[in-house]
Image (cartoon, helix red, strand yellow):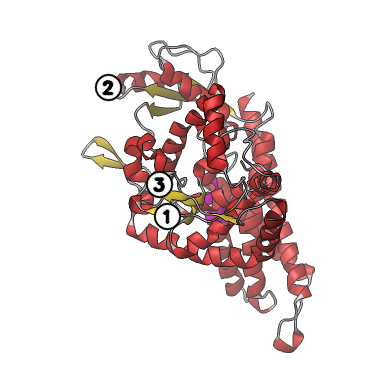
Amino acid sequence: MTRPKIWLISLILIICDAILVAGSFYLATLLRSATAVPLFGLESVSWDTVFSMVQLGVIFVVGIHFFEGLYPGYGLTAVKELELICKSVSISFVFLMTLSYLVKSFVIFPRSLFALTWLLCLILLPIFRFMVRNILSRTSVYGIQVTVFGEGQWTKDVIASLKRVRRLGWRPDSDQPNSVSTPPPNRSSIAVLAYKKEVSIAQKVRDLNQVFQKIVVVEESNNYGSLWVEIRDLDSFMGLEYQYHLLSRANTIIKSITDFFGAVLLLILLSPLLLITALLIKLDSKGPVFYRPDRLGKNFKRIRIIKFRSMVPDAEKRLEELLEQDPEANYKYKKYHKLENDPRITRNGRFIRRFSIDEFPQLINVLKGDMSLSGPRAYLPSELDDMGSYAATILRVNPGMTGWWQVLGRHNTSFQKRLQMDEYYISNWSIWMDIYIYMKTLGVVIFGKGV
């Protein structure tokens, strides 16, 4: 029954991709026709001329998606899936343009239409792919069964993680054994072996390979993620190369450039909203429009971030009184470093915090070079001791307006987990990861899931 389910999910994804590629061509044709200026040689293009290229575009995109393992794409993280989609689409359009040039169809099929369609595909395909996958992951036909082997709390954590991340498509057996010594009948094709580093796994992997097609080993001490881990063959010894990708010189330059131009563009686009918000804050309560708290910046330097004021002027005093009078609130604040139903927040403040509008003035910090558009959390100076050994890594980069834990964890994430997620971000950074964060952040802002 597993294989028909895989075919069904793959077919749904193929149909969606085909519709979106064709729709991108159609939308690009409409936009091209609407902006056509015959005087400058920008004649409109008919759909009949475009249709033959649409068919080739669908074949190329779906075909390369297939060879990249995107159907059904089980076991791929969202960031990796985004990377593969963008690369597949780009390769497909290189093929299309090359073919168009060779058969001289570019004479009637302008290159500007190729470029516009390519941009639309890069935007629409990932967005709708994630939406469709999110819907499908809630159904019983989605995913393949995997068997998780191991003992102790670490194995339970791995199982819980696989169950929580539904989009991954790896569903643990509900009645799996706790030992790897006696593999069960072949109910699934993938085995996940959760083990502690001090345990030898060679023989266990050999035993499991007698039953399962694939063996995935999850090491308890490995908290760095695997998006950019490289395997090294050291004369018959397997080595895993880890590095903090965001700390490399080239990546730092790339991120600085994208931060600067992104901040300039966003400030221009959001300027009307910023002016209206400032006026509403001034009318809502006494006090300044902006709030400038101290935070820990790069290399332990203290920076003053700029936020719209969302609390009463004597917020710190009220916090101290609340924590002294309410033991439960004191406990939650120490664990999460946040408060639910915070009494210090103003009426207007609840709205701008819900939609994360209070964070927008930090674009000025980005332009100044104190912050990044995405990055680790901007930690309080008082939290430095609580950061422990993580501080030496996290504080080597600029804090971000948004970040990995902000879009995936929000206020439900413990302080310790935030530190781990920030380190994960630094270790696994890529431009694709930032794009995914921006996509998730947009959803947080639009649907009002801020804190």
Q: Is residue 179 above or below residue 133?
A: above
Secondary structure that dominates the magenta span: helix
Number of the front mark, 1 or 2: 1
Span of residues in magenta: 81-89
Q: Amino acid at mark 2?
A: Glu
Disc 2 to disc 3: CB gap under 8 Å: no
- Residue toward you, 68 or 86: 86
Residue 404 point in image, percent of width and height: 50, 44
Q: Residue at x 52, y 23 (%)?
A: 160
Q: Residue at x 43, y 32 (%)?
A: 416
Q: Give the mark nearer the N terminus: 2 vs 3.
A: 2
Q: Is 255 one of the magenta-colored residues?
A: no
The residue carrying mark 2 is 198
The secondary element bearing badge 3 is classed as helix
Q: Give the mark nearer the N terminus: 1 vs 2.
A: 2
Q: Residue at x 59, y 69 (%)?
A: 97
Number of the front mark, 3 or 1: 1
- Residue toward you, 196 or 92: 196
